[in-house]
Amino acid sequence: MPIEPEIEPDAREIEASREIHRLLALVAAISEKFSKYANVAPGSALAADDARSPHHSVPQYAHSQVTVALGCLESLSAMIVREDADSVSLVAGPFGAYALVRNAMDAAATALWLLEPENGTLRIKRRILLGVDEVRHEYSFHQARGRSWGDNSKKRRARLSEVSKQAGLVGWNPLKAEMPSMTKILKQLERLHDDVTLPWLPAWQLASGHAHGKLWAQLVSHEMTEITGTRTATGASYKVRIRYVMLAALLGEAVQLVETAASRYVQLAST
């Protein structure tokens, strides 16, 4: 009969669990501060963006993306942190946590990419590009459901062209411009990344691998211990556990990306 291995306490894992708890507490603090900036200040950079493009708002889109990112990490906290009157502990299985980290990085990177230009014209261009991308994905969704949505897609794309002209973007066609991939976005944003343990792109790639159930991601970051009595000529069965050291490393990079995006929003919303 197979015997599952006994897992000895690991000092590094204990320390990493404390770091995860610290990072999730930081997320709560960022979220509390960010919640005070739903409305931009009159005269601020984002107020000027809104005046030029009121129906496809730069600040509203950016705010929603940062909110999504924070919400994903708050959901992670609710999923793995256990608190009672006497203690705080961390309980995480090998599946699920990284998907939330990946989603948080996606949303935060989108917000930061939208907001990082100093030039308001470029921010508005990026907002309209995101609108075109939204229409493309929604069209694909309805098409997969067997629903006719082509007329709506054409109308919305035409409206985005009108919005571009109304914002003073003469000579620029958003329907022919290219929306960069998340890979390109993260490479571009890396120059804003301080205190790097793992660059944002490979951190996102690893989290994405987990989100899609890829074996390579599990082999890279999980702890796998062979179960006694299961080995055959072609392989064996393993006990799979999440490694808090790896989760802490990726979470640290994700939190820094979210914090950078939130800080940039607050800066542009208040000055």
Image (tube, rainbow, N blue to C red):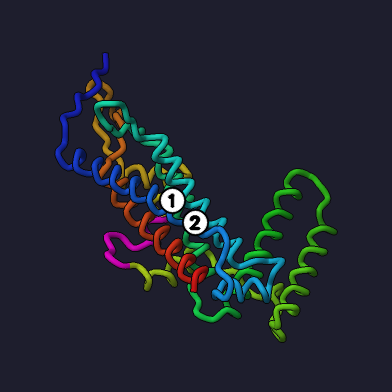
What residue is shown at x 79% (from left), y 45% (from top)? Answer: 146
**In magenta stretch: residue 198:** yes
54 w.r.t. 222: above or below: below
Asked which quadrant contains residue 152, the reply is bottom right
Question: Given the image, on which type of amino acid does mark 2 rest?
Answer: Lys
Task: Provide the residue designation for mark 1.
Answer: 32
- Expressed as whole percent of the image width and height from the top left, the position of residue 196 reads 28, 64
What residue is shown at x 70% (from left), y 78% (from top)? Answer: 167
**Quadrant (top left/top right/bottom left/bottom right) for the N terminus:** top left
Cα distance between the residues tagged 1 and 2: 7 Å
Q: Secondary structure beneath disc 1?
A: helix
- Expressed as whole percent of the image width and height from the top left, the position of residue 97 reads 40, 41
Is residue 45 left or right of 146 when viewed as pictured? left
Classify 10 Å Cα crowding around label 2: few (below 14), some (14-19), many (20 and above).
few
Q: Secondary structure beneath disc 2?
A: helix
Q: Looking at the image, which is closer to me, 74 or 97?
A: 74
For the record, the magenta segment spans 194-204
Q: Looking at the image, which is closer to me, 91 or 83?
A: 83
Task: Provide the residue designation for mark 2.
Answer: 36
247 w.r.t. 227: above or below: below
Mark identifier at residue 270? none
Question: Given the image, on which type of amino acid does mark 1 rest?
Answer: Glu
Q: Looking at the image, which is closer to me, 103 or 266?
A: 266
79 w.r.t. 269: above or below: above
Classify 10 Å Cα crowding around label 1: few (below 14), some (14-19), many (20 and above).
few
What residue is shown at x 42% (from left), y 58% (from top)? Answer: 258
- Expressed as whole percent of the image width and height from the top left, the position of residue 49 reads 61, 74
Is residue 155 left or right of 93 when viewed as pictured? right
- Expressed as whole percent of the image width and height from the top left, the position of residue 61 reads 60, 61
